[in-house]
Image: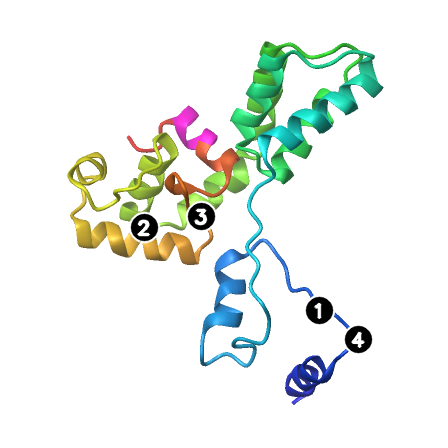
């Protein structure tokens, strides 16, 4: 009853803008695109992509100049963004640790700090993956090694050992769990720390 009154308040509002945001992509999409949900088509949908590399380069160099009085080497910036896949949470997490040092980081520092950080998250990553069925683990592991535009093609089927219908079901399930997403490169693992952890520990074997 309270929820219905809140919806009516949103619908009647003329001078107030409401923003619904969060990290659970599938849940948010369901809230506004599912006809059975009370918020169906209540708001305009805006998909916010990850921050562009060019914006990060400018920002990180500005912060480096403030911290060390020098710009970051280009290979250091490239490695930061490669490892974090431009994911804002992880760019912040990695750079926060790098910026705690008194000297400007080298590419080896970036890799060491990232590996240490991901390994610290290993308990919850392993826990999250442990709830997946074997087939879902096969699919997310294959995507961690290589995103794909053709998940039901022969190559991906061979890599996972699953038939196309089995792959399709796993993709649907993994999307609902917000573990993978679809972008211009195809299906990818949403969380770069999980993808890195899988590759480092060869969970496919």
Within 10 Å of disc 1 (Cα), the crowding (few <14, some 14-19, many 20+) is few
Report the residue at 73% width, 11% height from top: 104
Indicate left or right for 80 with 174 as reference. right
Give the magenta-colored segment's residue range. Answer: 196-201
Would you say the residues marked 4 and 3 are in contact, meaning their CB atoms lie under 8 Å apart?
no
Distance between mark 3 and mark 2 Cα atoms: 13 Å
Local crowd size for mark 4, using a 10 Å CA cut-off: few (<14), some (14–19), many (≥20): few
Of the numbered discs in the image, which one, if any, rests on residue 18?
A: 1
Q: Earlier in the sequence, mark 4 or mark 3?
A: 4
Q: Main secondary structure of the magenta part?
A: helix
Image depth: mark 3 or mark 2 in front: 3
Circle 2 is placed at which residue position?
Answer: 133
SS of the residue at dot 2?
loop
Which type of secondary structure does the marked residue at label 4 adopt? loop
**Eye-nearest disc, 1 or 4:** 4
Q: Nearer the viewer, residue 68 or 45?
A: 45
**Closer to us: mark 3 or mark 1?**
1
Image quarter where the C terminus lies is top left
Give the number of the disc on residue 179. Answer: 3
């Amino acid at each position: 009853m309270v929820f219905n009154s809140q919806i009516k308040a949103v619908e009647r509002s003329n001078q107030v803008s409401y923003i619904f945001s969060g990290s659970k992509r599938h849940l948010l999409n369901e809230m506004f695109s599912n006809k059975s949900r009370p918020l169906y088509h209540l708001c305009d949908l805006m998909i916010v992509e990850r921050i562009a590399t060019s914006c990060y380069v400018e920002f990180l160099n500005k912060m480096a100049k403030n911290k060390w009085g020098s710009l970051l080497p280009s290979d250091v910036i490239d490695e930061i963004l490669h490892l974090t896949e431009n994911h804002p949470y992880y760019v912040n997490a990695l750079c926060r640790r790098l910026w705690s040092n008194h000297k400007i980081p080298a590419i080896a520092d970036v890799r060491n700090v990232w590996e240490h950080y991901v390994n610290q998250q290993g308990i919850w990553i392993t826990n999250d993956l442990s709830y997946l069925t074997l087939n879902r683990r096969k699919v997310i592991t294959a995507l961690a090694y290589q995103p794909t535009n053709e998940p039901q093609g022969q190559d991906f089927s061979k890599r996972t050992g699953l038939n196309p219908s089995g792959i399709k079901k796993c993709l649907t399930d993994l999307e609902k769990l917000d573990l993978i997403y679809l972008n211009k490169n195809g299906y990818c693992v949403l969380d770069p720390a999980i993808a890195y952890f899988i590759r480092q520990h060869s969970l496919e074997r």
